[in-house]
Each structure stands twice: as C-alpha cells, then as structure tokens.
Image (cartoon, rainbow, N blue to C red):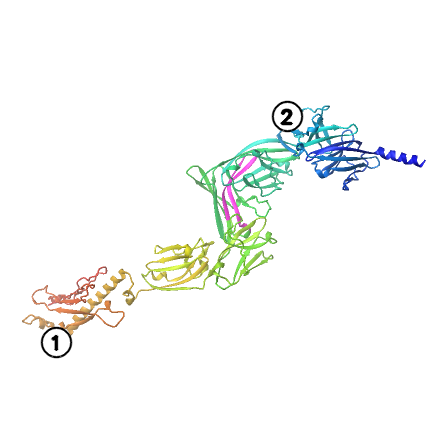
Amino acid sequence: MKILLIFFTFYLISAKVRCFTVTGYSGGSLLLDSGKPWFSDSDKYMAKQYPRRTIINSKKHYKWINEGRFTLFKNNEGLLMIYIRDLNKHDAGRYWIDVEHFWSISMVLDVKEDSCCKVSKRVMVNVGETASFSCEYSQNHINDDKIIFKEEKASIEMIYNRWKKKERFSISDKKNKNVFSVKITAVTPDDGGVYLCGVWINRRSYSYSVINTVHLHISTKVGVSRASSYSGSGLMIKCEHPQYKTRPKYICKESDGCSEKKNPEVQNERMKNGDVSLYDDTRAGVLMVFFRELKAADEGTYRCGVKVSDYTEIFTELQLRLRHDVKYPKSVTESVYLHGKVNFTCQIPEAYEVLFCKEDDNHTYNHMCRNISSSKVTHMSGSSERNEERVFTVSISNVSVRDAGVYWCGAETRDTYLTFISLTTKIQLNLIMPPVVRREGESAEIICPYDSIYKSKPKSLCKGKCSTRDRNENETKTDRLTLKDDVSTSVFTGTITGLTAEDAGKYWCAVTSETELNYLYTHLMVIVNEELNLTKYEGDDVSIQCKHHDEEQKSFCKAHQASVCVKDGVSLETVRDDRFSFSDEASAGVFTVNITDLREEDSGIYWCGAHAITEVNLEVKKTGFTGLCSPGVSDRIIVFCVCVTLLLMGASVLFFYKYIKTRDPHPLTDRTETSSGEASHAACDYENIRDVRQRSLSGTEETVLYSTVAHPTDSSDPHDTLYSTVQLPTNPSDGLLYASVRFQKHKESFGDSQVGFNNEELYSQYSTVSRST
C-alpha cells in the first residue's frame, strides 16, 4: 500500500514537471512558447539552477514581467512566453520556470557561437516610404519556417509566418545566403517599434524561435528650412515644437544616417565636424542649438526633431550652407575695470533683426547663448559700399563679475519652421582689477572677486595666458603663494611673499567649474632694487637699457607712480616723440630707449620694463655759460658760445674808448683845432682783452687778445676811421675775429654807436662807434 502511494505521488510530480532543451546563438535572442497557460492570479518564478540565481520572483499578476534581459508574458492564446535578449555564453545552463500551484518546467539552454545573430539593427524610414531590413539565420535552420514578431506594450505579437501574413509585409528568403529580407510598404507612425525576426522550431509540446532584433524608427518630415551663415562664425538654431513641449528633442546629420542623435541630455560633445551645445526649453517647446565655430565640414542637411514615442518622430529638415566673407566673423576682446562702463559695437545687414546674447558658463542654460534685453541696444543707421547695414551699440554700466564672459551679436532670420541667428561678432569681456605695485622682497595681495554661484568651486591664480583652449602657463605653483577664500564676500585672495622680478606679470583669477573661467585679471608690477639715476644737460643724448623677461609688451613710461603706467589692462608707452626711439635685444633680455636733444621738460621719473620694472630718475639741467662752452655739446651750441664771446669783445672795445676819453686833459674842441690835425694818442696804449671762450679748463692760463686803435692820418676825411683790431692767437685752428671802432668827424653824430653780431656764423659784423669831429 505504501509502495502504491509513493508511486502515485511520483506520477503526479512527473506530470507537473517537464524538461526540454533549446538552442540559442550568442548575440541573438530567444523566444520560447512554453505550451503552458499563464494563470494570471498565480505568482511566477524563474531561476537558474547552476549557479543558483533567482531571475524573476513576481507577486503581481500582469501580462508582462520584465527583469533586465529576461521577460515573461502572455500571448494572444493565453500561454506563457519566455523572452531572453542578447544571449551570451554565461546564459547557458538549466532554468526552472514555475507558476505557483499549477505547473513547473525545466529548460536547458545551450548557447552557441554563430555570426548570424550578433548585431541588432536600427532602421530609419520616413512616413509613406518602404522600410527594408534583413534577418540572418544559422545554416542549421535553412529549412525551418521564417517568422516575424513585434514587441507591443505588454506582449509580443506574431506579425508574419507561413500561416499568417499581415498586409503590407512581405518576406523574400535567400537560402543560399542564410538570410531573408523583410519589406513594409507605405509605413505609418504605428509601424515603428522593435521587430523580432528569425526561424521557428516546433517540438510538438513547445516551440521556440532563434531571432534577430530590428529597431524600426518612423520619422515624419513636417517641412524644409534653408539657412546660411559665415565660416568661422557662430550659429543659433531654434527648433519649435510647441505641441510636444516635454517630449525629448534632438538634432542629427543625415550624411551619417542620423545614427548619432544629439539631445540636451548629452552636453558639450562634438557632433561630427562641429562643436554644439543644446538646450531644451520645455516651457516653450523649443530646442535651441548653438554652434560656436562653423567649419566647412558642418555644411549639410540636418534633422531637427522631437521624439513623439520611442520609435516615432517628427522633424524639420535643415539645409545649412556656409559663406566666406573677409568681414565676418569678427573677434573682439574688451577690458574694463570692475564697476566701470563698456560699449560694444556690432554691424549687421539691414534686412535682419538684431540679436545680442551672452554665453552661459554655469549650466543654467547648458552653455547656450542667452538673449540680452533689447532695452540695452541702441540702433544707429549706417551703410557699407556693398549693401545697406545697421550699426548698433550695447552699453553695460556698473560692470560686475557676473557680466564678464563671452558675448555674441548677429542677425536673426525666421521662417515657417525654424529660427536662425547668424552670430557674426564674438566679444570677450574681461574685467580688470587695479594693478598691484610692490618692490622686490615685499609681499603682494591679489584680490579676486567672483560670482556667488561659484562659492563651492575650486579657485586658483593663473599667470600669463590662461584660457582653457589656449593655455601657455599653468596655475602659479610656489610655496610662497597662499590662497584664502572668503565665501561670505565672494572674494578669494592670493598672497605672494618675498617678491622677485620673476613673480611680476599678468595674473588671472580662475574658477574651476565644468570649464575653467578666466575673465578677471590684474597686473603685478615688481619694482627691482636697481634704481637708475641719470643727470644730463639740454641738448645731450642719452641711452637707457631696460631689462625684461621675454614679455610681449614692453613700455617706457613717464609717471610719478608705476601704477599709472597701466590703463585698461594695457601697459602704456606714454612717451611718444620723434626724439625717442626703441630697440629690442631679445636674446640679451634688454631693450634700449634712446633720447636725443634732451630738454629740461624731459626731467622726471620713468618706469622702464614690462611687469618687472626699473625706476629711472632723469635730470636734465639748463645749459649755463660754462656749460654751454664745455666739451661735448653740439655744434649749434658751440656757435652760440662764439657769438657770445664776440659780443663781450665788442663791449670791451666800447669800454676802452670811453676810458681813453675820460683820460684826455684837453677838451674835444681843442683837439679839433690843433694845427697838425692829429689826435692825441693817449688812449692808444695797448690793453689786454681776455678771451673767455678759450679759457683753459684744466689750468689757470689765459689767452690774451691784443687790441690796437689807430688814429686816422687825415682829419679832413669824413670817412677816416679809427680801427681797433682784436686778433686771436695765430693757431691755425682759430680764425681771425675783427672788431672795428669808427670815430666820425661830425659833431652832431657824436655818441652814436652800433655793434652787430651774426648769431649763425663764426665771424662778427663790423661794429662802429661814431664820434663827431
């Protein structure tokens, strides 16, 4: 009796549990019809026995149970189906599938390698066109029936087999190539989805299919737009889909089959041959696309679309063409002190609307170019030689750290489906902090304000050219530098101790976000300890050597303070005069400033260099009497010395003449009545006249010029003159200088005197002292 009971129990168990073996291929999928009912009110289980692993353990009673690559679902006949996607060798083994209280089956899965099923396909077709795709199968299944399924929302439905053929679907089997082709004519949006195609293996109590996976996407083209822009410029595209505000949007290029769709969830990636950012404005249903720098390879046809469902889309076709114009694009860098005012100027064709926007740096708009309020734009009329254009300006006052960054201006065009903005002028606005001027050995503090949204971001100081794309120097790394971030005031401070000439330079305040932001800088000017003091006379020349450290911009600036030599972030060459010339000896690390024909007003403090600067104190003295005649002065000054000497000599002659008169004991009238007619020779004694011009500088010797006065021999001759000859020494290098004194015989002319000197030549005019006789 016990034996009979055991046998009956074993019979019941064996009747509930059934075991079978199925074969799949690595990379493909497997669809198994268990031949058993679904039983909606029962829990379903699926587990792998070796190694033990529960795959599905459902307490719910749906028609579809998904767990990764494994799915249990109910087909149209109410039977439980098992679907395994993307098979791999680790899936091989024994599985248990159980419907609680009703039945259990055991399945042994064998996974083989075959090239037939390794790649799933993605097919795109427009509404109304014919969709074609192929399905490969293994040589082992040439004579098996071919079958097509389609995944629906809660099941997988048979679309085509030899007993069931859906309208518009057809199959062409090429057995010699182990492939059959599927065609779907006049596709509709409802045809989009996942198709499973392969072979059907029927084993009486169960059946299964070895299948490929095909993803069929159906697109609807709503219109065509054409846009043109300039090579190298920026471009903004607005794709408007107001009826699908929250649905995912994308842009792709048709030349690559639109296989790479860019959407706002994938930021700052390069499309093929282009750098693009996207932003989905779900409030307006607008996809914004921003090309920063158009290249020739960016020309082509694009799709700007929206994903209506997982496999259906609508799009606008965009045909983009590029033009080449030397006028566009333009790139401008503007620098303004914090809290100052700046003006931007842009020029666009007359027929277009103006757009002015700022690139977003903090992902608020996903690095898009945000439109700036038109209230800041002032329009002005203008024209060009080729076509009418408009010039407009944008003013920003009380500039803050939030205003720093990259701006674009351009022309906006609208058509039925898309809006285009050709961005022709790029403007980078940098902020400047006042220069920091310190001497070698001192400490310097560099103040860096920043936008409060970056409080939690890393900060750094960067010396030199520090843009993310064009960096030639890394952040300053020295143990003498310390950074302190005061988040309460949104200011960080860099302190450098023990300054050296090498510390001088241009420093950028950097905030490391998703990209590094470098729009604020200051100049650190270090005054070297080698001060230069120069004393010169008017008319002299001077050469001043200035050290530098291979910096591009060098300056020679006259100012009381070194900080004055920097304005708007640019080192000034405040000295602009034909008498000043510059020569650079880069290999020697110096440049030379030459000044000719010095003037007294050239005196002052000069700052020489670039950022490491030398203080030069230049004193230009007025030329005194001795100074004028000192060696080393110009020829023009020597001529002036000679003329002054002659003037003194002429004055000496007049002095001696008056001196002789005062010593004459007889009145003048008596002498005129002398019978012999001879004048007294009392005043004709030799007198010494010292030549100041040729006074020796090294000793005390003096050169004497002899003066001779001769009385006229004929007193009746009115033109007879007393001559006084001043003769320089007979050295061949010294010319003879003559001075004459004429005594006229007419009484009414007595006392008239003329002394004349030519200021430009090396000789004197005759000087005459007239005496009436």
Q: Is residue 166 left or right of residue 330?
A: right
Extreme left residue here?
675
- Residue 665: mark: 1
Residue corresponding to mark 2: 186
Q: Is residue 424 magenta?
A: yes
Q: Quadrant of the N terminus?
A: top right
Q: CA distance from mark 2 to mark 1?
A: 147 Å
**Quadrant placement of the C terminus:** bottom left
Q: Is disc 2 placed on a helix, strand or loop?
A: loop
In the image, which is nearer the foreground, mark 2 or mark 1?
Answer: 2
Residues drawn in magenta: 402-428
Q: Position of residue 400 (x, y in %)?
A: 54, 52
Q: Is residue 345 visible?
A: no
Residue 125: say if magenta.
no
Where disc 1 sits, the SS reads loop
The amino acid beneath tag 1 is Pro
**x%, y% of residue 604?**
39, 62
Q: Amino acid at mark 2?
A: Ala
Residue 126 in the image: above or below residue 770: above
Q: Is residue 670 above or below residue 503?
A: below
Looking at the image, is 368 positioned above or below residue 711? above
Is 255 displayed left or right of 134 in the figure?
A: left
